Amino acid sequence: MNHGPATRLDGRVAVVCGGGRGIGRRIALALAADGAAVALVARSEAELRSVAAEIEDLGGRAVALPADLTDATAAPAAIAQAEEHLGPLDLLVNSAGIGRAHGPVWAGDAAQWCDDVDANLRMTVLPTHAALARMVERGQGRIVTVSSRRAMQLSAFGPDDRQPANAVANSSYVAAKGAVLMFMEQVAVECLPHGVRALSIAPGRVRTRLTDDLATTGGADPGSWLPWQDDGTEAGRLAVRIAAGDLDHLTGGLVSVIDDPDALEPLLRPVPPSSPS
């Protein structure tokens, strides 16, 4: 789907958490192609440096910042380093995530299930907390978090959503995506008076390492398990529109790559200042 003409992001600075591969990589490349300087944050230094090289080959600016985003000190340190290298932060993209507790709820390890949800929340909350402290002070900024339509819909993650019995179970992933979706909604409410906007995006069915792991665990062939829609390019285009401010009126909401963002109704509306008594 075409999300409209590209808007140049020259002079903007973005931090992409989980930017070393998958959807995060595609978002980072799209932002860089439109002129943004991009800081890439994740655990794998080799993957980050590879994406940074791709961006530099496009003529852009990028910095690789290896960090464990579940660490309460490493995440804010990465945000600080990004600003030291590239300048004040305009956009934070939360795309880091894991999903290791596969299988029915009753059949797996309960501790692993809880660890998955905790890790996904920490990888969203900690960078957001650090970025907001800077954005709110400056009175501007945007946050994009990769969630999923599965956070809002009763559906299976398998070859046919109408046949849950044939699907691979992954309830920790669904719970985590639902949690970060509601977290972003609350962030949007709190930040509305401070000039900061926060949206969640649903990237569609994109083949990633996580989905390959899901398929393999369920005994399926990753190459044919799902009707893959694209490689994350559409999520990148959507992120560019958000970075450019085109979708500020949708703050707090979930926008999918299959939506027409221009036709969506705002979830939140600014409260007009009260008249003096």
Image (cartoon, rainbow, N blue to C red):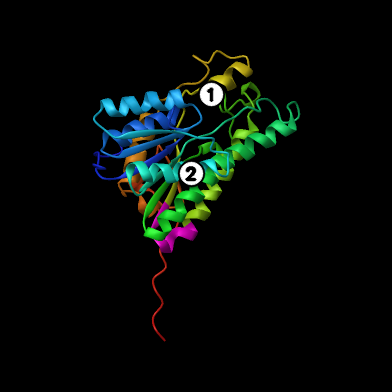
Kind of residue at disc 2: Ala
Which residue position holds label 2?
77
Look at 32% across and 37% down and name the residue there: 31
Q: CA distance from mark 2 to mark 1?
A: 30 Å
Q: Nearer the viewer, residue 78 or 219?
A: 78
Q: Nearer the viewer, residue 4 or 18?
A: 18
Q: Nearer the viewer, residue 174 or 61?
A: 61
Q: Is residue 267 visible?
A: no
Spot occupied by residue 140 in the image (x, y as percentages of width and height) = 36, 56
Question: Which quadrant holds residue 257?
Answer: top left
Which residue position holds label 1?
211
Please say if 213 is above or below 88: above
Going from N to C along the chain, the mark reached first, 2 or 1, is: 2
- Classify mark 1: residues with Cα within 10 Å, few (<14), some (14-19) or many (20+): some
Look at 32% across and 40% down and name the residue there: 240
- Residue, far right: 106
Residue 73 shows which numbered tag? none
- Classify mark 2: residues with Cα within 10 Å, few (<14), some (14-19) or many (20+): some
Spot occupied by residue 139 in the image (x, y as percentages of width and height) = 37, 60
Specify the principal SS of the magenta part. helix
Spot occupied by residue 245 in the image (x, y as percentages of width and height) = 32, 50
Q: Nearer the viewer, residue 5 or 40?
A: 40
* Quadrant (top left, top right, bottom left, bottom right) of the C terminus: bottom left
Spot occupied by residue 189 in the image (x, y as percentages of width and height) = 48, 59
Please tell me whether mark 2 sits on a helix, a strand or a loop: helix
Kind of residue at disc 1: Thr
Examine the structure image and report whether residue 135 is included in the region drawn in magenta. no
